Amino acid sequence: MRTNLRQLSGGCRCGAVRYTVTDAFEYGAICHCSECRKATGSAFKPFLGVRREELRIEQGADDLAVFGDPDGHDARCARCGCFLYSVVREGEWIHVAMGSLVDAPTRRPDHHIFVGSKADWDEIRDDLPQFDGYAH
């Protein structure tokens, strides 16, 4: 974890799980795929990508519910069910669910992905670039 950059705090709704993450996000997107819709119970998942070593669980590691394997999973609070982050890309990266951040990050999502499979009722109302799958 890089300590020369600002540390952001985040956590779950009930307060059982707290984390810090370095404000060193390298990308951000809004995903509309069916898996993210199911994981969030929403039309999309806004997330920011950061190297895995930049996130540290400060409180409640025993209260994490992990769905998947060590190199690819979603992490939630086992008490309140709050979606916190995903481990992706062979376990090297974290996609922080932006709704779990307490502090405002420097980076914002700058494109939409998997628009080709978005929910029919979902209307994208911004001018960010859109991709049918992953961004090119």
Image (cartoon, rainbow, N blue to C red):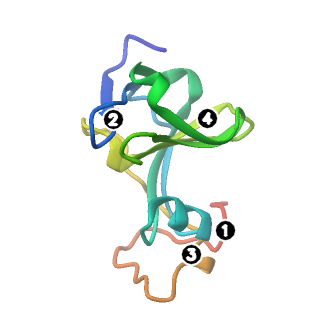
Specify which label sits upstream in the sequence, 1 or 4: 4
Residue labelled with disc 4? 93
Specify which label sits upstream in the sequence, 3 or 1: 3
Residue 130 is left or right of residue 110, and the answer is: right
Alpha carbon distance from label 3 to label 1: 7 Å
For mark 3, give the secondary structure: helix
Specify which label sits upstream in the sequence, 4 or 3: 4
Residue labelled with disc 1? 133
Horizontal and vertical percent position of residue 36: 55, 62
Alpha carbon distance from label 1 to label 2: 29 Å
Q: Residue at x 38, y 29 (%)?
A: 23
Specify which label sits upstream in the sequence, 2 or 4: 2
Alpha carbon distance from label 4 to label 3: 22 Å
Residue neighbourhood size for the residue with mark 2, other residues' Cα within 10 Å, grouped as few (<14), some (14–19), many (≥20): many
Alpha carbon distance from label 2 to label 3: 28 Å
Q: Residue at x 49, y 69 (%)?
A: 129
Residue 35 is left or right of residue 59, and the answer is: right
Alpha carbon distance from label 1 to label 4: 19 Å
For mark 2, give the secondary structure: strand
For mark 4, give the secondary structure: strand
Q: Amino acid at mark 3?
A: Val
Specify which label sits upstream in the sequence, 2 or 3: 2
